[in-house]
Amino acid sequence: MKVVKTACAALLAAVSAHAAAVGGLAEVTVFDRSEGRQLQVYWHEGRAYVVGKPGNEYSVRIRNRQRADVLGVISVDGVNVITGETAVAQQSGYVLAPYRQFDISGWRKNLASTAAFYFTSLPDSYAARTGRPDNVGVIGVALYRKREEPPPVTRSAPFAQPAPLGTGERLRKQAAAGAAAEADAQSAARDAKREERLGTGHGRIETSHTRQVGFERASSEPAETVTIYYDSYRNLLARGIVPPMPPLPHPYPPRRLAPNPFPGFVADPPA
């Protein structure tokens, strides 16, 4: 019986982790720091969504699943979280060691500190306050493989090995898919303007040490781009993306004592 319980617990944990993570080269999750939990991912028309709670701090959690270093260029609301520039995939990012996990919890201020991410109203978001409100409500991670050193050329192999067939075509398809995803994101942003959207604020300053390292990308385009959209529960419910919350159970009525046939002596009635 103990073995069965252990197996069931492991299965439930695996299902829960899968439901909260997005990505292949690396697992990307959104972690609510205020409530200490990973946010559930809801899939709708091929897109991943999470529910943000206004005022709560959060982090973008990335776990490298590869045996080599991976570069992750992180964008929040269309803004590079390190440089503050309007994000493009070829900008600076974080280098993730093999099989390691790293939490990006804020806007990078310098090599020793960040300004915390927190869910907030659109006007208070960092993107809107810096004049870039169009892409509020989306987290993006562009993942790059590291360029491998070519093997030394020996006399028995005077010619370099040709590139695999279809490499150029694959890169062109990736670029086209990225452009289509960007167009879809812009369309969704325009559609959501009719209601108050959720954005990411520039919060309290925290200690967060990092250092600069070199990383040569294996390709000019990302090997994978992970996109997670977020908004308030009310907005996502109105769009049919999240299910309604189950009704709260009725509280138990106060216990009523049964009449006592022998309560005591006779008292005088009130005047």
Image (cartoon, rainbow, N blue to C red):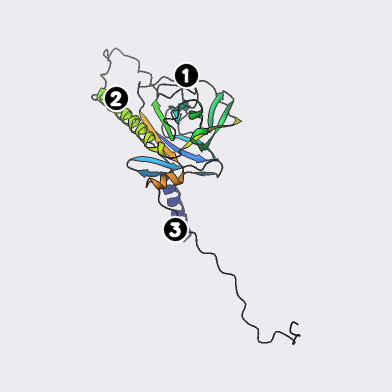
Question: Does residue 159 appear left or right of residue 200 in this picture?
Answer: left
**Mark 3 against mark 2, which lies toward the viewer?**
2
| Relative vertical location of residue 203 with respect to residue 231 in this rendering, above or below | above
Q: Does residue 24 appear anywhere in the picture? A: no
Residue 129, percent across and down?
51, 28
Secondary structure state at the residue bearing disc 1: loop
Q: Earlier in the sequence, mark 1 or mark 2?
A: 2
The type of residue carrying mark 1 is Gly
**Residue pointed to by mark 3:** 4
What's under tag 3, amino acid-wise? Val
Q: Are marks 1 and 3 in contact (CB under 8 Å)?
A: no
Residue 20 x/y as whole percent: 43, 43
Q: Residue at x 44, y 48 (%)?
A: 16
Circle 3: element type:
helix
Q: Residues within 10 Å of mark 1 (few under 14, many from 20)?
A: few
Question: Which residue in the protein does label 1 denote?
Answer: 214
Numbered disc 2: secondary structure: helix
Quadrant assignment, res 26: top left
C-alpha distance separating marks 1 and 2 = 24 Å
Q: Residues within 10 Å of mark 3 (few under 14, many from 20)?
A: few
Can residue 183 be seen at all in this image of the molecule? yes
The C terminus lies in quadrant: bottom right
Category of crowding for the residue at label 2, using alpha-carbon neighbours closer than 10 angstroms: few (below 14), some (14–19), many (at least 20): some
The residue lying at 52 percent from left, 20 percent from top is 212
- Indicate which disc, 3 or 2, sits on the residue closer to the N terminus: 3
Comes first in the chain, label 1 or label 3: 3
The image's mark for residue 260 is none
To which residue does mark 2 refer? 171
Q: Nearer the viewer, mark 1 or mark 3?
A: 1
How far apart are the alpha carbons under marks 3 and 2? 47 Å
